[in-house]
Amino acid sequence: MPKSFQDLIEEVHNKGICQECGGCVSFCSSANYHIIGFEDPYKPPVYLNKDQCLECGICYYICPQTHILDDELNKTYKFADYSSMPIGHYDNIYSCQATDKAFLEYGTDGGVVNSLINFLIEQKLIDGAIVSRTDAPFSREATFADSKYDLLKASGAKLDISPQLDEIQKFCTYTHSIPKLNHYKFKKLAIVGTPCQLYTIRCMQDLGVTPSENIEICLGLFCYENFFFEKFQIAKFEKDFNIKFSDIVKINIKEDVIFKLKDEGTGEKIVHIPFNHLNDYMRTACNACGDFSNIYADISFGGLGSPDKYTTVIPRTEKGKKILTQAINSGIFNCKDIDPAKKNKMIELISQFSRSKVQRKENFMKNLQ
Ligand SMILES: Cc1cc2nc3c(=O)[nH]c(=O)nc-3n(C[C@H](O)[C@H](O)[C@H](O)COP(=O)(O)OP(=O)(O)OC[C@H]3O[C@@H](n4cnc5c(N)ncnc54)[C@H](O)[C@@H]3O)c2cc1C
Ligand code: SF4
Ligand code: SF4
Ligand code: SF4
């Protein structure tokens, strides 16, 4: 039975697990006829012109919540299924840091992702990348970067939020990167994304949906969850955690969520908040997600497993391994010498988070049915 947007409404929207990622709207086979679209950017898309729907099912197949192409992707990316092997395919794991002082200083962890993109641009392997710029704590915007300057602007650390804070009504750490692809159809691209976003890209590549063929490399971030809240919840957040929103300088995510705050006395203060204390601010759709370590990426990156100012790096595909080797050999990263016992510990920690995410998904989905 062919699928259509109607099936997405029934199987995704009506269950409350639409991520409002915009993939279905942006890559609808008849997008020019505005068959589907957003009436509210914070609500699932709707049929605008149902009569013109081709019932081709593209929207359904590329949606990160249907998982209809899992078997095909798992064959391509060399593992059976992520509930039995939640960390995905890997041969090695690294802990790296950018040698460029600016990428390191402004980077989220070791500044490795942006430093690698910069290397790919300099080597003319890509024209640029879809990245994400911070507007405010818990607020980001997709942007195209084709220079070191653009990449530094999109780095993790620079939260200069006071001017726009009043204008922002809803805060979300999720970035709408997928629709942005449509603006750069003819560029050779890298894309930085969470597991759900790269899943959509891999489905598009599997089905030959344009412009996924122009994506040269998928750089995947680990992701336990994303946060969303409305402005009226800021006061609750500030009270719950004794944090002033406007004092947040940086957010890091490792075994818990780490807030770096401005502090009048000491200059800087660090507050750790466990994930389960932030449940009130987690996007509902994240409950239905079982991939932590970005199993379909060419290379995955995270803070978990590495010390402060280092990024954990897992190359996965042949392309990912080749590019990472070139980058390491060119001297853009310092990679820690990690002995096998430490590597095993890193793998175990990442597997633990991956299993916990699969478990969370299973519990959530059970209650949905
Ligand atoms: C929403 C989110 C959740 C995360 N959860 C975890 C986690 O649970 N555990 C963990 O270990 N690591 C997590 N990470 C990854 C971690 O925070 C770092 O991004 C990663 O370690 C790379 O650090 P870096 O210094 O090498 O990257 P940098 O050199 O600072 O580059 C980071 C790149 O990521 C891009 N980016 C930032 N936010 C987004 C976004 N929302 N969507 C798409 N691209 C984005 C930036 O534009 C930049 O290009 C998460 C990241 C994000 C964005
Ligand atoms: S035309 Fe195809 S992609 Fe577009 S809404 Fe209909 S089924 Fe989905
Ligand atoms: S593709 Fe994205 S916006 Fe469309 S139904 Fe799926 S999750 Fe929602
Ligand atoms: S938890 Fe899953 S659904 Fe939520 S943002 Fe991360 S990858 Fe996407």
Image (spheres, grey):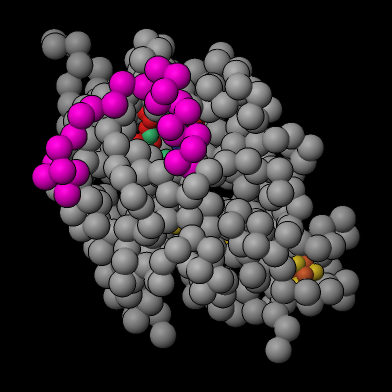
Q: Which residue appears farthest toward the bottom when viewing the image?
A: 1
Task: Between residue 206 and residue 56, name the one nearer to us.
Answer: 206
Residue 27 image-quadrant placement: bottom right
Q: Which residues are magenta?
A: 320-344
Please identify the quadrant where the N terminus is shown. Answer: bottom right
Total numbered circles:
0
- At a point 14% along the width and 48% down the height, the residue shown is 345
- At a point 62% along the width and 48% down the height, the residue shown is 178
Residue 295's spot in the image, x, y percent? 42, 56
Task: Between residue 33 and residue 235, name the one nearer to us.
Answer: 33
Residue 44's spot in the image, x, y percent? 60, 62
Quadrant of ligand 1: it is top left
- At a point 33% along the width and 71% down the height, the residue shown is 83
Task: Between residue 300 and residue 15, name the one nearer to us.
Answer: 300
- At a point 50% along the width and 34% down the height, the residue shown is 323
Q: Is residue 47 visible?
A: no
Residue 147's spot in the image, x, y percent? 60, 17
Q: Is residue 322 magenta?
A: yes
Residue 36 appears left or right of 237:
right
Residue 272's spot in the image, x, y percent? 17, 37
Q: Is residue 63 visible?
A: yes
Q: Is residue 145 magenta?
A: no
Residue 307 image-quadrant placement: top left
Q: Main secondary structure of the magenta part?
A: helix
Residue 289 drawn above or below residue 4:
above
Task: Between residue 281 and residue 182, name the one nearer to us.
Answer: 182
Residue 242 drawn above or below residue 81:
above
Please identify the quadrant where the C terminus is shown. Answer: bottom left
